[in-house]
Image (cartoon, grey):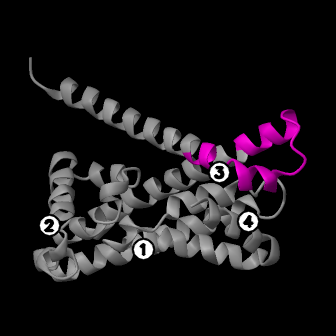
Amino acid sequence: MASLIDQLVGFVGAHGILAYATLFLAALLEAVPIIGSVIPGTTIILAMSALIPGGELHLVPVLASAITGAIIGDGTAFWIGHRSKLGILNAWPLSRYPGIVAQSETFFERYGTLAVFLARFVAPVRAVVPITAGALGMPPPRFYAVNIPAIVLWALAHVLPGVLAVTILHRYGGFAHPAALARHYWMPLVIVGGLVAGLAVWWLRHRRGINVRAKRPE
């Protein structure tokens, strides 16, 4: 993975515009069922966001690339499930991974509509919940009403921590160039982004638990 990040930094330095296409594809492929489970899209986005403070990349295009890729990826998976219904969950290639499908169905049954939101921050089911939501008959307007805000928050949670961490280390840590931080300190940036995403999920689950308890009759 260190070699991959090193190559990405070099790639961005030589082909800045194509870097946004890489971010778009990373976010899109991460939403593809099964394939998304092995694509290090989140790691790529976190690492490349560390290049924003140095000017190699720019914040708005990075966010736009990640958000657009994720919306298209999740939306495509949802519509495949919506048109194919439950049969798609038993078809290839999903039929080869019954454990992941079962985990996604359980996740969806437990959290309902909120599962579409939470799945954006839970790697094992992120790539399967959209197609499951479609297969189980979730109305498209409801899916997009939950999915798009989740993707925007997901993108912010994975881009801004890297920008903030690199800016602070560059300004107060004595590092000469932000690209050096992205090259040598990508793992702490990934951890920071993961913690932010994890805290967002914990807060949402905690809030949901409070709401559920409040609605129970005494």
Q: Which of marks 4 and 1 is nearer the N terminus?
A: 4
Whether the residues at callouts 3 and 4 have beta carbons within 8 Å, the answer is: no
Q: Which of marks 1 and 2 is nearer the N terminus?
A: 1
Q: Which of marks 3 and 1 is nearer the N terminus?
A: 1
Note whether 198 is above or below 73 in the view shown: above
Residue at 84% in and 42% down: 170
Q: Label 3 belongs to which residue?
A: 186
Image: magenta residue range: 164-190
- Nearest to the observer: residue 107 or residue 6: 6
Give the prevailing secondary structure in the magenta stretch: helix
> Mark 4 is on which residue type?
Val
Q: Label 2 belongs to which residue?
A: 98
Query: Spatial distance from mark 4 to mark 1, Cα to Cα?
Result: 25 Å
Residue at 9% in and 17% down: 218
Q: Is mark 3 on a helix, strand or loop?
A: helix
Is 138 on the left-hand or right-hand side of 33?
A: left
> Mark 3 is on which residue type?
Trp
Q: What element carries label 2?
A: helix
> Mark 2 is on which residue type?
Pro
Nearer the observer: mark 3 or 1; the answer is 3
Q: Label 1 belongs to which residue?
A: 73
Residue 23 placement (x, y as % from top left)? 60, 70
Q: Is residue 208 found inside the magenta-colored segment of the image? A: no
- Sort mark 4 into few (<14), some (14-19) or many (20+) by Cα contacts within 10 Å: many
> Mark 1 is on which residue type?
Gly
- Sort mark 2 into few (<14), some (14-19) or many (20+) by Cα contacts within 10 Å: few
